[in-house]
């Protein structure tokens, strides 16, 4: 029996099917608005299943440099044939050629959701050989810009990406605000600590202030002996080895709890930890690939009503001061002053915190722009 035709089929290469932005934000909003939606992404399930009104089409998990990145093109094509979606939501630039071909041959509309400045990431990243990065980055940007005329809509995850692809009126910014769908039930997650603690959570990376946060926490611990919970993951074995060595070398290593590591931490666990922590760390570095971005972590702490230690400079400092994010950290500031600010910090009201949450209305406006409202 042929499945009913989809309104939206989300396609990604490296992201999990239940990715925070793809599944919890875009797909579940579309489903609540009456659309028939499926997400094809990495998932360990052996058969399709439904979650939160969204059909999950599992793709076998694989690594960034796996040959299966080529096989995924064929799998995506078969799914498009099988489900005949009215619109493909593309979350990976390497799927654009397939999407464009399907538009030409099958009349499928295309929504391109830009999570990152992919060309920038490639040119400054370490995943590819240095001799390949600049050439590959140019090809990705050329592909994106050439595809724009055939796209129905482009959404950007960051305000700094707005008009990056010269999409004009086709473009809308949907920032990575906090998804209330990810709030766990009261008994779903057990806290690892009952005492107050500092928190470093999310993807673990040097440029996201991983080691700077540990250094700062050690200084704060001398004034206020709250443990440090590090809850996150990284696929970089070298980084994880360096992190474990740093923890072992800490003079307060018995007060550091590492959750995750090589394995992802369930998002519900992250949410519970944020709600319970004394304060979190978000000491992002001025690296080209992340400079100017407003991390999801900022919205998460604002929406959940906990303070975050953030960089004082640039757009991060301006955002933090404007939105009462927590306490800014900069060279020359004393740990005593920082701790005093965190202790005196008070959250916004629940009504005000709603401004930092994902809204179905924003997705509805994009669906209207794309010509596909609820049916």
Image (cartoon, rainbow, N blue to C red):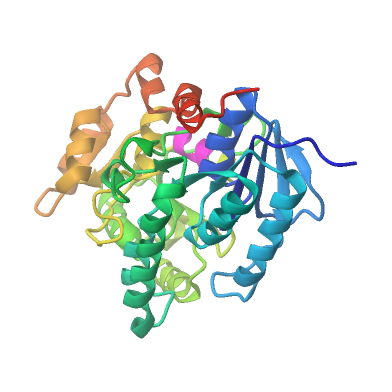
Q: Give the range drawn in magenta.
A: 269-276
Q: Is residue 191 visible to the viewer in this orientation of the structure? A: no
Q: Does the magenta stretch include residue 142?
A: no
Task: Give the x, y percent position of residue 82.
Answer: 77, 49
Residue 182's spot in the image, x, y percent?
57, 34
The residue lying furthest to the right in this view is 1
Camera-side residue of 317 and 355: 355
Position of residue 315 relative to residue 255, above or below, is above
Q: Which residue is drawn at 82% across and 39% down?
A: 3
Front-lying residue, 102 or 175: 102
374 lies above or below 164: above
Is residue 2 left or right of 94 when viewed as pictured? right
Q: In which quarter of the image is residue 146?
A: bottom left
Residue 7, position in %: x, y? 65, 34
Residue furthest to the left in view is 332
- Residue 312 or 116: which is nearer the viewer? 116
The C terminus: image quadrant: top right
Is residue 295 visible in the rendered image? The answer is yes
Left or right of 320? Residue 251 is right
State which quarter of the image contains the N terminus. Answer: top right
**Residue ranking furthest to the front:** 105
The answer to whether residue 291 is left or right of residue 277 is: left
Task: In this rendered view, identify the residue nearer to me: 141 or 351.
Answer: 141
**Dominant SS type (magenta):** helix
Q: Residue at x 43, y 27 (%)?
A: 357
């Amino acid at each position: 029996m042929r499945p009913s035709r989809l309104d939206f089929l989300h396609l990604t290469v490296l992201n999990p099917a239940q990715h925070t932005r793809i599944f919890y934000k875009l797909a579940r909003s579309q489903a609540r608005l009456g659309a028939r939606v499926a997400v094809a992404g990495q998932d360990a399930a052996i058969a399709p299943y439904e979650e939160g009104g969204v059909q999950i089409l599992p793709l076998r998990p694989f690594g960034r440099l796996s040959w299966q990145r080529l096989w995924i093109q064929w799998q995506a094509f078969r799914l498009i044939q099988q489900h005949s979606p009215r619109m493909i939501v593309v979350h990976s630039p390497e799927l654009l050629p397939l999407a464009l071909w399907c538009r030409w041959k099958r009349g499928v509309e295309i929504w391109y959701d830009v999570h990152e400045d992919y060309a920038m990431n490639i040119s400054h990243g370490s995943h590819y050989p240095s001799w390949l990065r600049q050439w590959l980055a140019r090809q990705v940007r050329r592909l994106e810009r050439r595809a724009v005329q055939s796209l129905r809509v482009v959404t950007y995850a960051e305000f700094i990406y707005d008009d990056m692809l010269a999409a004009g009126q086709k473009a809308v910014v949907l920032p990575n605000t906090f998804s209330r769908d990810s709030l766990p039930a009261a008994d779903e997650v057990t806290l690892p600590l009952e005492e107050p603690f500092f928190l470093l959570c999310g993807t673990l990376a040097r440029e996201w202030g991983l080691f700077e946060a540990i250094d700062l926490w050690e200084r704060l611990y001398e004034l206020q002996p709250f443990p440090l919970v590090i809850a996150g993951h990284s696929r970089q074995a070298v980084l994880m080895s360096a992190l474990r060595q740093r923890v072992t070398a800490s003079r307060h290593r018995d007060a550091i709890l590492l959750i995750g590591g090589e394995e992802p931490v369930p998002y519900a666990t992250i949410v519970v930890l944020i709600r319970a922590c004394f304060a979190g760390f978000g000491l992002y570095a001025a690296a080209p690939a992340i400079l100017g971005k407003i991390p999801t972590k900022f919205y998460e702490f604002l929406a959940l009503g906990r303070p975050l230690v953030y960089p004082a400079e640039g757009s991060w400092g301006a955002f933090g001061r404007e939105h009462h994010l927590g306490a800014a950290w900069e060279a020359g500031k004393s740990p005593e002053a920082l701790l005093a600010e965190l202790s005196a910090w008070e959250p916004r009201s629940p009504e005000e915190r709603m401004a930092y949450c994902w809204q179905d209305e924003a997705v509805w406006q994009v669906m209207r722009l794309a010509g596909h409202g609820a049916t």
